[in-house]
Image (cartoon, helix red, strand yellow):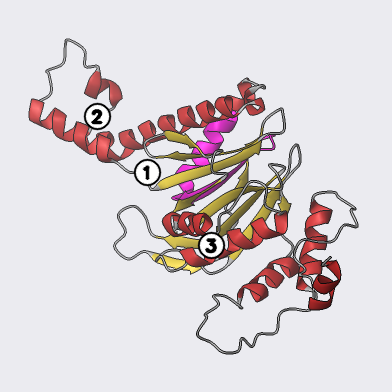
Amino acid sequence: MTVCLASIAEKSKAIVMVSDKAVTYGGRDSLTPMQYDTGVKKFCKIGNTYWYALIAGDPTFALSVVDGAEQIIGGTSDLPDSVTGMMQCFKVAYKKRRAALVEDVVLSPRLLNKDLFVARTTDLQPLDQEFFFGVSAEAKALKTNSSLLVCGFDKNARPHIFSVVNPGVVNVHDLTGFHAIGVGSTMAISRLLILEADLADHLGLALFQAFDAKVNAEVTQGVGYNWDAEILLPCKKAVPLRQDVALLIENIYRAHPYTPFRRRFEYQFPKNWDRRLFTFCERVMGRKSKQRHPYRRKSASQKSKSKP
């Protein structure tokens, strides 16, 4: 019950990661789940690498997958250098944890384990066929209620985003440059498509569009109001979005959506919002350029001067 999204920006030099902060309380069999906005962070650094995982759904299962992936990475130091290596690592970890969950939830209550179910020795009586197929169907239909969105850069500083979902299916999203997971993922992805999010977008624009997509996902029950954002750069720890910049983006967004039927649009934008956002983004990217920032529009007098 959440929404997590990631978007590549700055001509593939940065990845913006955004999530809500809602937590749903209640176990797998709970009839009265509770949801509340908390201070929890849904970004998880993967071991000693510079890859990050965003978790949606059951955090217990998702964190166990991350832990399993970290153990695999620890034994093979070159895995983080390529996206294929990281994808295979998470695929194996996810399937291993799901197999353990099947044994706990489906087999153990029937006094069975994997060997007793699929590899019975000759000295044991065969299982009833109807019972066997019934248990098999239940194991196949078991949902983990958990998914992960993994982001990072390979050894050539190329950005990558891939998702890991039940029952261990891995999908790469480098072509579009963005993706979302969680109950609000459909709304978030559709909004990014409408906004035409692009890998070349300036960091400030990417941050605003990611927040826009998260807000649109709030119409889905289970998506929280509060949000987190972090910016991932090659070979560096993720940079958290400063609280004042997050508030600035929220105040800018209050002007939306526009409507052509309103004669006058009366909204006082935050003072120098464009310059403040641009300055923050330039500092994150490590640039000291004095170039004109891309958010400020030319005035009428400037436009007339620029005309031949």
Quadrant in which the C terminus appears: bottom right
State the residue at coordinates (49%, 66%): 216
Q: Residues within 10 Å of mark 2 (few under 14, many from 20)?
A: some
Residue bearing the label numbered 1: 144
Is 216 a magenta residue? no
Quick one: SS at disc 1? loop
* Place of residue 302 in the rendered image (x, y in percent of width and height, measured from the top left): 84, 72
Q: CA distance from mark 3 to mark 1?
A: 24 Å
Q: Which residue is mark 2?
A: 112
Label at residue 16:
none
Secondary structure, mark 3, is: helix
Q: Is residue 67 magenta?
A: yes
Eye-nearest disc, 2 or 3: 3
| Of marks 3 and 1, the one in the foreground | 3
Q: Which residue is under mark 3? A: 214
- Residue 100: x, y in percent? 38, 33
Magenta-tinted stretch: 47-71
Does residue 237 appear to the left or right of 162 in the view shown?
right
Quadrant where the N terminus sits is bottom left
